[in-house]
Image: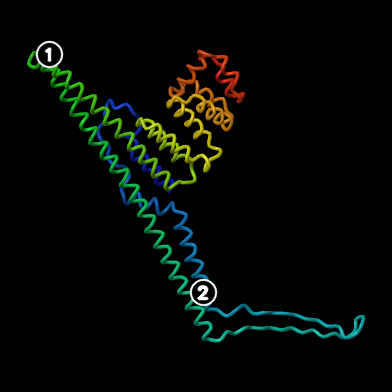
Amino acid sequence: MGEFLLLLTIFLAPTARGEDPAPVQAATPSVLTLAEAERLALRASPALKAAEARIRLEEGRLRQAGLYPNPDLSLDSSWFTDGSGSRETILSFRQPIAYPRKRDLEKKEAMERIEGARHDRERERLEILLEAREAYYRIHFAHEVLKVEEEDLEATRAVRQAVDARVATGDAAPFESLKASVEVSRAESEVSRARGELAAETARQICKVEPSSDLGPVLLAQSLHKLARTTEARDVLLGSLDQFPDAYQIRYDLARYSCQMGDLAEACAWLAEAFGISGTAETRILALHDPDLEPLRKQFGEVGNEAGSIESPLLREWLAQKF
């Protein structure tokens, strides 16, 4: 399902790539239809491939059930006296022939196995289609909501321009321009919220179809954080820690969210774990400019001697830098 979700992301990219609601682009036609999404989901499913392989296996057993068993050919030599005296050599050939009724039963069993394998494949196919359709419609609905909000933003901007023109000519009071600006701000907020909901729904579907990847929880938490639901974002990542013990991005984002929630001690602990798992200077450089870690940088920038109490050498080194 990875390719399916990748193309769903492409489908959403024109409207979900940023938080800044201005300027609004014209709605881009869908690049992924439901039929294409279903086809990609079926093609990428390992469960469906396994079901098809089982059908081929059972068909092979059916062909084997219609054949005689492999014959046995043996050659035996026996010496009657010591040395190079007389000996007896026996060449034997044995061909087992099963009773006709037994062969018929074996064929019937093989055909029933094939029918069962086909039913299993159809069940897998229907489950995959249901999953693909659910993911498609959920994301498509969120995308359509975003398009409506974008159209509303375009309309409110057009109204504001018209009101500003009337105010400039003296046909309307300046207060009308202020009201129009408030409406534009409201529409921009709704567009930003719709984009966040769209990104969050996409991440939820990634969690479902790619449960072995930490990408889904990370994206879902980041989307919730952008929607000012930082506590929920933190809970999502905390629930993924045991499943992904080596995912530094989860620890890094937990540090960001803890920092934004005011728990600087916990932020330090998570950041130390992230630095230890990542093992690269790029992560520490990124943290120097991460706006979510600003409270932590400010705290230790003002009270630099507190960094000496940190156990992690990497974190002490990072905190010792000039912010």
Residue 84: give its label: none
Q: Which kind of residue does numbered mark 2 sit on?
A: Arg
Q: Residue at x 21, y 29 (%)?
A: 154
Q: Secondary structure at mark 1?
A: helix
Which of the pair 227/184 is nearer the observer? 227
- Residue 156: give x, y in percent of width and height: 18, 27
Residue at 42% in and 62% down = 121
Residue at image mark 1: 168
Residue 63's tag is: 2
Image-based side of 166 in relation to 145, left or right: left
**Crowding at label 2, few (<14), some or many (≥20) Cα neighbours within 10 Å?**
few
**Label 1 – label 2 distance at C-alpha:** 88 Å
Q: Within 10 angstroms of label 1, few (less than 14), some, or many (20 or more) residues?
A: few
Mark closest to the chain's N terminus, 1 or 2: 2
Q: Are marks 1 and 2 in contact (CB under 8 Å)?
A: no
- Secondary structure, mark 2, is helix
- From the top left corner, tell me how far across and down residue 296 is, in percent: 48, 21
Question: Residue 106 location, x and y as percent?
Answer: 51, 79
In screen coordinates, is 140 left or right of 98?
left
Residue 165: image quadrant is: top left
Q: Nearer the viewer, residue 188 or 89?
A: 188
Which kind of residue does numbered mark 1 sit on?
Answer: Ala
Name the image quarter holding residue 309.
top right
